[in-house]
Amino acid sequence: MSRHREGASASWEVFLRARRGLAHQHVGSVRAADPDTALALARDLYVRRGDPLSLWVVRSEAVHTASPDERDPYFAGAHHRPYRYPEHFAPLTASTGPTEKGADGAHVE
Amino acid sequence: MSAPTTVVSADRPVVSADAGATADRDELLAHFDAIVAEGGMIEPRDWMPDGYRRMLIRQIAQHAHSEIIGMQPEGAWLTRAPSLHRKSVLIAKVQDEAGHGLYLYSAAETLGVDRADLLDALHRGQQRASATFNHPALTWADTGTIAWLTDGAAVINQAPLCRTSYGPYARAMRRVCQEEAFHVRQGYDLMRALCEGTPAQKAMAQDAVDRWWLPAVALMFGPPDTEAGGTDARTAALGAAVSRRAMAWGIKRHTNDELRQRFVDQCVPQAERLGLTLPDPAIRWNEERGHYDFTPVGWDTYREALGDDTHWARQRTAHRRAAHEDGAWVREAAAAYAARENENENENVVEVAAENAAENAVVDARQREEEVS
Amino acid sequence: MPTSSDTRVDTAATGVATTTACTTAGADADLAVHLLRLGDDALVLGQRLCQWITRAPTIEEDLALSNIALDLIGHARTLLTRSGQLDGSSRTEDDLTFTRSDREFTNVLLTELPGDDFAVTVARQLAYTHYAVLYYEALAGCDDPELAAFGTRAAKEVAFHRMHADRWTLRLGRGTPESTRRMRRGLERVWPYTGELFAEDEVLRRLVAAGSVPSPAPLHAEWERRVTATVTDAGLTVPAPTWSAGGGRSGLHTEEFGPLIAELQSVHRQFPGGTW
């Protein structure tokens, strides 16, 4: 990136799997000139305590982003599909008979 | 995909004003205010007022600088720690401070500043660390006192920041606070050992407390910002205005003086248990208020405590600058090596997994904790 | 309290040390001497690394060097504690660290050399960590369960330190002309001091003959092969020194060692009878 001056280290995002069974979670970033160093520094910085399982470092500039404010089309759909959620439907304990329906056809308790 | 894919750093602000330019600023501000008002988190790529961004950068940078400069007074005693247990504890603590500085620089970078620029500003004296560290650590007991009092003050200051409105700052602070609790405990423990030791050891402990109480109570919480805190109405109004804005933005959650009172209330019983005297004759329990009274930290006291333009204030920056300058050739070598390697391969993701890498030695940190505790 | 005279190291003109132990059985006394040496190596190197903290080329490196120092102090604590138990003096890790005189320290000279040039520090770390990985791995196979457990743990930790040293050797060696020059000079500075790590004396020969600990001497060839690989990778050549330093094991130190020990012990000695 043009912002990086001569001699300045690149930024790396750090992901840590804290325990078996968990996904890697973003924990922060480190500055390092190369990937090996970035990994070692990430270990020194984010693994001083606990018993973590694995580490990833990713060049910050290699991460492509989409967030709601600038990319409405990416997320707009997520809010308006109530039928993607189980709560939209009658509970499995419900018996037959007249049930109240909301305006969007959802089951109302 | 219709929208062009913008390539930016992860969690870095959008530098071009593409989103903001078209939208109505009032609408954006209303949206921002609404999130903050309901206690929500602002994230790096959200729109935010310039003043909010500037206040955050200033506060996070000063906080980060304080961690880095704060390594020095204790770091000076690493080679002289009087037992190997204490030596290990002190190394672990100074190391945490370096770590905290780095967490915070990393949070500041999400606001669109470069860590190298922040460090340059520190080295040039344009940005500062907490004035607390303008004071020298003259004896071994100072290391315990700094941990007990100034880290104790820091925890009180920082606990509310775990809920601060800016996401990356709050997340960094949660990490910091978890680790900071160990600092205070080990400091108290160190002081307890001295107070239970020989008369000479206890005298050393008292001397350190005599010197560090004022910097801790005055400087760790910032200038007075309420009349109750001991300042006159006009200055209180000024201080309060700054605090109020920070509070409205959810960057700050309490006034300086509120936190200061909380600190005194916490320290007095601890000092009593240690058998140490806090150097303020006005300290006494106030039944009516349900708090300890103490000599208010007015602006004069505050200024006096600052210790600007002293040998030590200058020395802290000079020490940091010398390390940076002496290490320039090493950083240049690392950059040159990386640039050459980069020509050969373009590696974006690297992984080390503890389950199979023979040499990874993501060491058993728990074992170390046991050693230290 | 038994003094150091119980395990006094008599130095012949050749620098070869022999020990006479009075209070404990010979084998235990020998082992005490050996563990004290290993512990002193870790302690003194840890102390040298502590001097870097807040002065390193980057804040990340402050963190990396303090991590290594912390591990080394940990090794010293285990080794000195065990040594104090075995020599019959019941001296604790702190007694051994803070109350011995300079002459009673038995670390190799390599560990005490001033390391204020980062390249010298890297060169020393390269030499020491490659040795320590090999020796601690060998120690992990010894009969004494406590020592074997220590060897296993320490070998893992120094393996990480070795990666750090390899990484920097490569970067300095193949960085800029300035760093190449400094790295070469660093290697030349420390190399004459590496032989002492592998030296055998009567104590060690008795211990090895009894099968109680491994000797570092046979590891020298493998060490040479490994450091040569890294140094060659870094575009440099392993120095071929015309002389080899010695004396540390018998308490004959450099003149820079006195100030190091004085600093280490100053607070402890200033408060007689103090508890910490």
Image (cartoon, coloured by chain):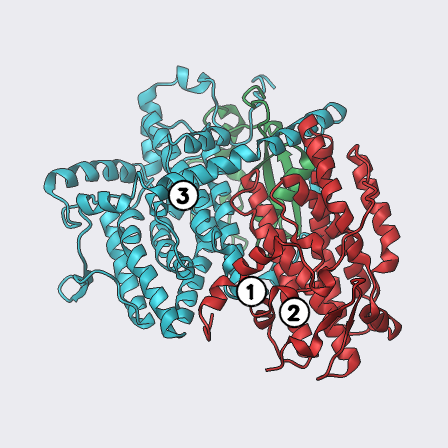
- Percent x, y for residue B295? 17, 56
Circle 3 sits in a helix, a strand or a loop, which is it? Answer: helix
- Percent x, y for residue C214? 83, 66
B201 or B43, which lies in front?
Answer: B201
Report in which chain the residue with disc 1 lies.
Answer: B
- Which residue is denoted by mark 3 in the rendering? B66
Q: Outermost residue toward the top?
A: B22
Give the mark toward the camera: 3 or 1. Answer: 1
For label 1, count other residues whose C-alpha is less than 10 Å away and answer few (under 14), some (14-19) or many (20+): many
Q: Pointer 3 and pointer 1: residues touching (CB < 8 Å)?
A: no
- Chain B is shown in which shade? cyan
Rendering quarter of residue B166: top left
- Chain A is shown in which shade? green
- Which residue is denoted by mark 1 in the rendering? B84
Q: Amino acid at mark 3?
A: Ser
Number of marks in the rendered image? 3
B299 or B233, which lies in front?
Answer: B299
The mark that comes first in sequence, 3 or 1, is: 3
Q: Amino acid at mark 2?
A: Leu
For label 3, count other residues whose C-alpha is less than 10 Å away and answer few (under 14), some (14-19) or many (20+): many
- Which residue is denoted by mark 2 in the rendering? C80
- Percent x, y for residue B134? 35, 45
- Percent x, y for residue C224? 85, 48
Report in which chain the residue with disc 2 lies.
Answer: C
- Chain C is shown in which shade? red
Q: Which residue is located at x 44 percent, y 70 percent?
A: C271
Q: Is residue B317 above or below residue C65?
A: above
Q: Is residue B337 above or below residue C114?
A: above
Q: Pointer 2 and pointer 1: residues touching (CB < 8 Å)?
A: yes
CA distance separating discs 2 and 1: 11 Å
